[in-house]
Image (spheres, grey):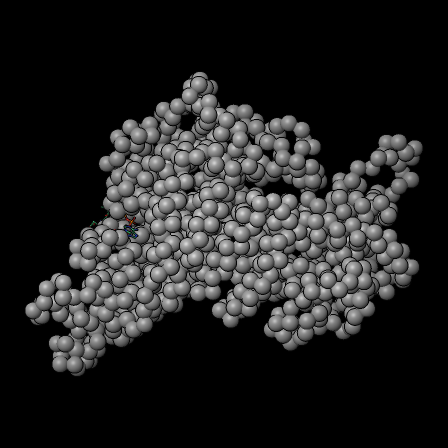
Amino acid sequence: MAANNSEPILEEEEGGGRGVKLEAEEAGEGKAGAAAAAASASATQAPATMLHRSGSRPQLDLSGAAIHGNLEDRNPTILLPNQSDDISHLALDIGGSLIKLVYFSRHAEHSNEDKRKISMKRKLGMFNGGRRSYPILGGRLHFVKFETGKLNECLDFISSKQLHRGGVDSPSWRSGAQPDNIVIKATGGGAFKYADLFKDRLGVSLEKEDEMDCLVAGANFLLKSIRHEALTHMDGQKEYVQIDQNDLFPFLLVNVGSGVSIIKVDGHGKFERVSGTNVGGGTYWGLGRLMTKCKSFDELLELSQRGDNSTIDMLVGDIYGGLDYSKIGLSASTIASSFGKTISDNKELSDYRPEDISLSLLRMISYNIGQISYLNALRYGLKRIFFGGFFIRGHAYTMDAISFAIHFWSKGEAKAMFLRHEGFLGALGAFMSYEKHGLDDLRIHHLVERFPMGAPCVGGKIHGPPLGDLNEKISWMEKFVQKGTQITAPVPIGFPATTGMGGFERPTAKGDILRSDASAALNVGVLHLVPTLDVFPLLEDPKMYEPNTIDLDLDEFKYWFKVLSDHLPDLVNKAVASEGGTDDAKRRGDAFAHAFSAHLARLMEEPAAYGKFGLANLLELREECLREFQFVDAYVSIKQRENEASLAVLPDLLMELDSMNEEARLLALIEGVLAANIFDWGSRACVDLYHKGTIIEIYRMSRKKMQRPWRIDDFDMFKKRMLADKKDQPYKRALLFVDNSGADVVLGMIPLARELLRHGTEVVLVANSLPALNDVTANELPEIVAEAAKHCGILRKAAEAGGLIVDAMAGIRDDPKDEPVSVPLMVVENGCGSPCIDFRQVSSELAVAAKDADLLILEGMGRALHTNLNARVKCDTLKLAMIKNQRLAEKLFNGNIYDCICKFEPVP
Ligand SMILES: Nc1ncnc2c1ncn2[C@@H]1O[C@H](COP(=O)(O)OP(=O)(O)OP(=O)(O)O)[C@@H](O)[C@H]1O
Ligand SMILES: CC(C)(CO)[C@@H](O)C(=O)NCCC(=O)O
Ligand SMILES: [Mn+2]
């Protein structure tokens, strides 16, 4: 009954903490918070005329955008001098049963343009000249719903978060300007019905958008922009479908809300509502409420999971004395007449089990909708039918019943597909109708879907607020823990058995608890909009590309569940220490541990709960959870310590290398990369090792053990390319994807980079944008390179040429020709904060840097083995890693822990 217990907690949260304390809300938003809180305090005194407002639709005016303040600052703000309109990206769909809200919150920190990025953009010719520069557009799309009958809660929510005024961090909120003339896009019948109420209560005008237009726009947007938005659901099995952009239209869109709209969609804005039925979600909920006395929709749905419809429905067998009517393809267990059995009995309503009534009703309505949809698909020759609307509610039985009807009547020709953002189509469509928020040409790679607190805890629930600020999140977790409940109830999902002959046999096994709305809803997390992300241009076939090497199936997940759970206490300790070990840090640490464990528990029940989910996503989820509780960098001191220790021995290593001949040196360098890749805090085995010796000792031991041939050993091929075949044609530009801090980067990758530079190859070190485990980040690299360069002329000149360090002697030297110009050594960020890399979503600066690259070096398990082992790119690729995981070694290479991989893949 955990699901039941968890719900009142949310309710409490809503009634109590949320929305009242704006200062607390600000805490999560960083520095801007204090200013905004101060502004809010003086809101009443501020002159209402401080901002010009046009009164029409909100717009973003980026003209004249400039960096404000010192360019050397780490986080200079971007000033939009011509931005005068409110940026109010909130849209509503007010339906007969539910109000849906979609709103956008900007990343306060998105205007980060540090020194490294600016210099890099100059180098790559991106500065000011980039294709797009919407610095302000990065942010998150949130999805929330309320019951229409509780409109007041919705109004309170909007008002507490100041969504109608562009959020609590918007200029108008800070200025205290009165929200007159604010216009919000709204669709659904309630946009007409409640327009006056919105005006009275919030002072906003609702700009009405047509409901069908919005449904279609929302569906098209989702199918175009969200990876794996659609799924099929047959016999209890979920399968995500990747829609081909070029083969999307025509399709049938069936929106099952209170009533059902059936729309034939031929293109963007091209559609016709071809049918509808008044037997829909409102019918199930309304009849069900009357007949079972249920207090909520979820209660009714939950009842159905324990139901047996054979006591209510009249089966073919009931009519045919237990026989099939096989001549027309009906088995005895096929339902002949929904509720038909109740006519013959001398029974009252109270004689029937509410569970059975609910199930019978649910089946009747779902099956009927499926059948009508099929007939309309047949009418227009359509093969694909997409279902939206909150009636679906991610509920297995509902989806199975609809799918079954369509599959059966079309003899397998037509396919039912369900949209994960099911009920938000209309609201999204209304949101898209804002003209100038620049989201129109959004691409799949600009959207990063994340579930740190979105899926198991919040988001989808009726009047459940997305927990906006840190305090809210932590206290939610604390309450949750106090009650000793689990966030999500372990729900054995029951699969209805089908006869294959036109009806349902009564479902056999069914779980007895309905998953809480938030997690049952098909994983509507928060969509992060990062307009600066791009597809890696060197990918051979982006459509076929799959980052994860191994499917995260239940078996695989179980393994990772244990690894990650075991590692959790240590991680929490590190994280708390990294934030000074204060009580506040401890509180956040606990909350992080609980949030992450809850995700793990949820995924353990159902690995596909959050869409198509691979190890890369799982590892990223952990990092995202840390960030969610404001742990900036849990490994910061470990990284520093190891960098220092490694930099101290680098000069010796370089001397040793320089004493070798070219061939021996190349081997020593590759060996060095593999040996140093042992410093991986993501590997349990290695962490155990670290307690047994100093970094240098371990590195030396690791190198000594390097026995060739390695598990995959293409070294000779690589050597041939480097030193024999085309010695006079060195690589033009190499991208080196670096992994860990310390020995890994300092004693492994930097010496290899140096060798490439020596050959005349430009080197781009590609590192994480955000911290993940002990991985080195792009921000940390320039300092490390500068330290290394102190002992090495090659590195110094190349780093100068790449703008990483400034030559103090430049301009003083008599004859600049003395110093030959070097090829540059550069650093770019990869756009992610995960130990793996998904080449479908990389930073735009990496995408630019990649265009001239003819060698790719991927180093480390995360980037070269867990992901991308099978990735094909358009240039020569070297994948280097030490396998620090027995299971992976066996699974992928039939090998052993500490085996090494040196995989060279030249393009033909
Ligand atoms: N928590 C809930 N409360 C009420 N209904 C729910 C809930 N969750 C799912 N539903 C189902 O979803 C239906 C409403 O779906 P949706 O929000 O898509 O439609 P609507 O926009 O309110 O209706 P319409 O478009 O017909 O005006 C309800 O009728 C009910 O069957
Ligand atoms: C009236 C709407 C469009 C309101 O969303 C919806 O509830 C609906 O499509 N009802 C079905 C009406 C019919 O076509 O019979
Ligand atoms: Mn609706």
Q: Residue at x 85, y 57 (%)?
A: 653
| Nearest the eye: 732 or 332 | 332
Q: Compared to 717, does 577 lie above or below?
A: above
Residue at image location 50% in from the left, 55% down from the top: 594
Quarter of the view holding residue 811: top right
Identify the residue shown where x is 47% and y is 50%: 478
Q: Quadrant of the C terminus?
A: bottom right
- Figure quadrant of the N terminus: bottom left
Confirm whether residue 68 shows in the render: yes
Residue closest to the eye, 463 or 866: 463
Q: Is residue 86 left or right of residue 400?
A: right
In the figure, is residue 373 to the left or right of 667?
left
* Residue 6 place in picture, x, y as percent: 38, 54
Question: Which residue is at the front of the view, 395 or 515?
Answer: 515
- Rendered position, 105 above or below 380: above
Please state the horizontal and vertical placement of residue 693, each as a whole percent of the image.
Answer: 78, 62
Q: Position of residue 696 (x, y in %)?
A: 80, 59
Locate residue 140, reporting x and y percent. 48, 43
Tell me, yes or no, if residue 654 can be seen here.
no
Q: Residue visible at 53% across and 52% down?
A: 590
When the figure is inspected, residue 628 is found, relative to residue 681, above or below; the finding is above
In terms of image quadrants, where is residue 367? Answer: bottom left
Total tally of numbered discs in the picture: 0
